[in-house]
Amino acid sequence: MSSVVPHPEQAWTTGTAPGIFPFLGHAITLFRQPLAFLTSLPAHGDLVEVRLGPQRAWMACHPELVHEILMDPRTYDKGGPLYDKLRLLMGDGLVTSGQEAHRRQRRLVQPSFRPSRIADYAETMGEEAELECRQWQPGEFDVSGALMALTTQVTSRVLLSDSLDAATAAEVRDCLAVIVRGLFVRMVAPIDALFRIPTPANRRYRRALDRLHTIIDSAIEERRAGAPRNDLLGTLLGTGGSNGGATALTEQEVHDQLITLLLTGVEAPALCLASAFRLLAAHPEVERRVHREVDAVLAGRRRPRPDDLPHLVYTRCVVDETLRMYPPGWLFTRITTTDTNLAGRRLPRGTTVLYSPYLLHHDPVSFPDPDRFVPERWLPGQEATVPNGAMLPFAAGNRKCMGDTFAMAEATLAIAAIASRWRLRSLPGCAEQPVPAVTLGHRSLVMICEPRSRTLVGEPSRGSSRECSVAPPVQDAPQVPEDSRTAGDEGVCDA
């Protein structure tokens, strides 16, 4: 989160991860037990050699080394197996572009993520969260699907206003679910011939990819033929090639940015929310504290507003701790652009370097008892005890996620809207584990949905402006601080 100044006198250690299979390297272990494999690496050094298929790569296991990588994007540029595969999906968007192209693109897109715009987006977030909650029913409930529907609706409205109807938005959601699973397998076993075989999984992946691109192309074409809109697509088209500016986005870049922002804006926040509710169900004392805070701040309202965000202090702590335990962005690669030294090891140009927020976030040196869910770690004043550079849910440096403030606001408001109305309980005997793919989280989460208060009578349907009656707030809710802080054996789905 804040900068780390490497200590020149640090005596770094290097090593090689055990269990290398001929031709496949560590792909089998990464596929079957990726999280356990990652957390085992620091025992072999601060910088550890791993094999991605036949390719060699180096995993940075110490936060200072990771910080060195992230703060020097010219030497450690976006690249490696992950980004090679992502470029086939996203093109050269903000996530995948090289350093020079990224600087130009970021200047053009950045105005859409200024604080003043985030406040506007927060209105949309609160509205969509409340509207989604109205559709829920008591009993067993597909939480993952509902949260993906919510984040798809929020993201599509921010990017495209009302360009996607309900059926198309559902298609987008389904396509993204197929794509992110297939991308991870293609990353850990970067042998392209395997994925040219017309297996059912490979055909599903190709169909989903083609359909997503078609949907985006249709939205762009429709917008060009219609009236301008004050959304992100409107911003991108406003910088398009027709104005002849030196920094204008090309037609292909507009497409690539939409694909990038759609992919990053839908699945990752949905996974974070699903993981948060899974954790709350397993920790009833934390859940009760969230309920008290939400009831006090919303004071009988069902729809959270942007001005509630500074008062949802503990709810935001839950989001922070969820991101620590299960960061959706859990494994990343970089490529050295020149010969360099890292941890005393000479790395030739073109070397793949990896870092893992999941590994850093589960380091017991940085986070005592790292497998415990403790939102209090992030209360105002407490976060200072976290070592600099140990918490990286949104990366760092000039490639830090531009939507970090957006994502935190969306997750906080969504939890508040849902918790004001519903309590989610785990199914008896359920031990749902986070599923690593390109992103990490609880992907197929079914829970028991229980109303928290008396049933609301005569609630309006989506799109209606009629007010509804609400239950009174909990009477024993504590005072809420005025300001928030600023700042195993896990399987993988097939391709």
Image (spheres, rainbow, N blue to C red):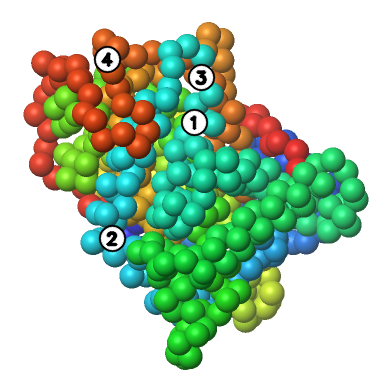
Query: Which one is earlier in the sequence, the residue at label 4 or at label 2?
Result: 2
Q: Which of disc 4 and disc 3 is earlier in sequence?
A: 3
Three-letter code for the amino acid on which mark 1 is drawn: Ala
- Neighbours of disc 2 within 10 Å: few (<14), some (14-19), many (20+): few
Are the residues flagged by discs 1 and 3 in contact, CB closer than 8 Å? yes
Residue 87: image x %, image y %? Answer: 66, 65
Q: Name the residue under label 1.
A: 146
Q: Residue sitting at 68 percent across and 32 percent down?
A: 491
Residue carrying label 3: 141
Q: Tag 4 or tag 1, which sits nearer the N-term?
A: 1
Disc 1/disc 2 C-alpha distance (Å): 26 Å
Mark 1 to mark 4 CA distance (whole Å): 23 Å
Residue placed under numbered mark 4 in the picture: 457
Expressed as whole percent of the image width and height from the top left, the position of residue 438 reads 62, 48
Q: Earlier in the sequence, mark 1 or mark 3?
A: 3
- Residue, far front: 226
Please state which amino acid type lies under the numbered disc 3: Phe
